[in-house]
């Protein structure tokens, strides 16, 4: 403990805050806090300056990890930054803290170069071992990166296949006796997909009928009334009259059925494909 306290006492304030490790790497979150930037803007800053930085490469300039905190249901993403990359980020912060951090990381880079010089003074055998170890480490990182890219490519491929399959199912011809079932199941699937937007099944059905009326110039409400009267005149049961609906009106007329089928297909492609 005394040695640890002495070590801390010998550190400058910036070293205490940043906690640069023996490899010269530093936490992006700690750097952000040292720069005294808006705490609520950390995620946007990290995404813009680290993840989407075209001049930075993951597992070369930075390494991503998650800060595990059982008290926080939404853990924060952090990054280990090389001294060179951290210096660039600090240079982009035009305030006194940014200048302090930049100068500090210049010193860190200098120390790392000294270590490199010391390695060159090792025996040929140890230098060869160091080169071999470094090459193996780089190879392992490359393999992990390739595996990650392969997993992402596989996911994208599966999503494309699923989209193509959904489109094929949508445009395929339907057996006559399955048309009504297809319409109802399609509206149900789309309704579930839009559930988080507060649009339920019946709202979607009403919207689809409105689209049909606009395109076909039809008055479904009038057709429904006339259809019920026709059933009553034909001495149909009260249940049959009560259950007669707009979908029956549509199915009875070939033109309306074709137009409405096209509308449902468009909705499937828009929300499910």
Image (cartoon, grey):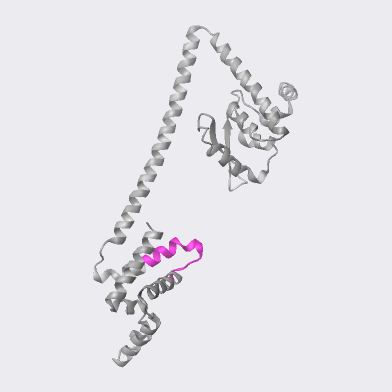
Horizontal and vertical percent position of residue 73 = 58, 48
Q: What range of the chain is rendered magenta?
A: 185-201
Q: Where does the C terminus fall, quadrant-wise?
A: bottom left
- x 74%, y 24%: residue: 5
Horizontal and vertical percent position of residue 72 = 61, 46
* Residue 69 in sight here: no
Does the stretch in magenta take in 191? yes
Q: Residue furthest top?
A: 123
Q: Where does the N terminus fall, quadrant-wise?
A: top right
83 or 144: nearer the eye?
83
- x 67%, y 31%: residue: 18
Residue 235 image-quadrant placement: bottom left
Residue 2 image-quadrant placement: top right
Instruction: Indicate whether 214 appears above or below 118.
Output: below
Drawn side of residue 268 relative to residue 56, left or right: left
Horizontal and vertical percent position of residue 172 = 27, 61
What predominant SS class does the magenta segment belong to?
Answer: helix
Horizontal and vertical percent position of residue 139 = 43, 25
Q: Residue furthest left?
A: 175
- x 57%, y 35%: residue: 79
Residue 4 image-quadrant placement: top right
- x 29%, y 61%: residue: 171
Does the stretch in magenta take in 51? no
Drawn side of residue 136 relative to residue 9, left or right: left
């Amino acid at each position: 403990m005394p040695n640890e306290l002495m070590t801390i006492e010998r550190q400058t304030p910036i070293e205490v805050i940043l906690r640069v490790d023996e490899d010269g790497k530093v936490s992006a979150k700690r750097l952000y806090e040292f720069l005294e930037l808006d705490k609520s803007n950390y995620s946007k800053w990290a995404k813009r300056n680290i993840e989407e930085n075209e001049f930075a490469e993951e597992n070369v300039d930075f390494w991503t990890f998650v800060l595990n905190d059982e008290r926080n249901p939404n853990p924060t993403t952090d990054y280990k930054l090389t001294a060179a990359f951290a210096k660039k980020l600090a240079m982009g912060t035009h305030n006194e803290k940014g200048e302090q951090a930049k100068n500090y990381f210049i010193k860190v880079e200098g120390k790392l170069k000294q270590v490199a010089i010391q390695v060159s003074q090792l025996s040929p055998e140890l230098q060869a071992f160091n080169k071999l170890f470094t090459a193996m480490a780089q190879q392992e990182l490359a393999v992990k990166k390739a595996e990650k890219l392969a997993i992402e490519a596989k996911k994208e491929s599966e999503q494309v296949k699923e989209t193509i399959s959904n489109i094929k199912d949508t445009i395929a011809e339907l057996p006559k006796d399955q048309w009504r079932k297809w319409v109802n199941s399609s509206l149900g699937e789309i309704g579930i997909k839009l559930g988080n937007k507060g649009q339920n099944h019946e709202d979607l059905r009403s919207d689809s009928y409105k689209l049909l009326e606009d395109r076909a110039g039809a008055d479904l409400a009038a057709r429904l009334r006339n259809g019920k009267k026709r059933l009553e005149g034909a001495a149909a049961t009260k249940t049959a009259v009560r259950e007669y609906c707009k979908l029956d009106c549509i199915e009875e007329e070939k033109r309306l059925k074709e137009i409405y089928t096209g509308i449902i297909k468009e909705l499937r492609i828009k929300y499910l494909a």
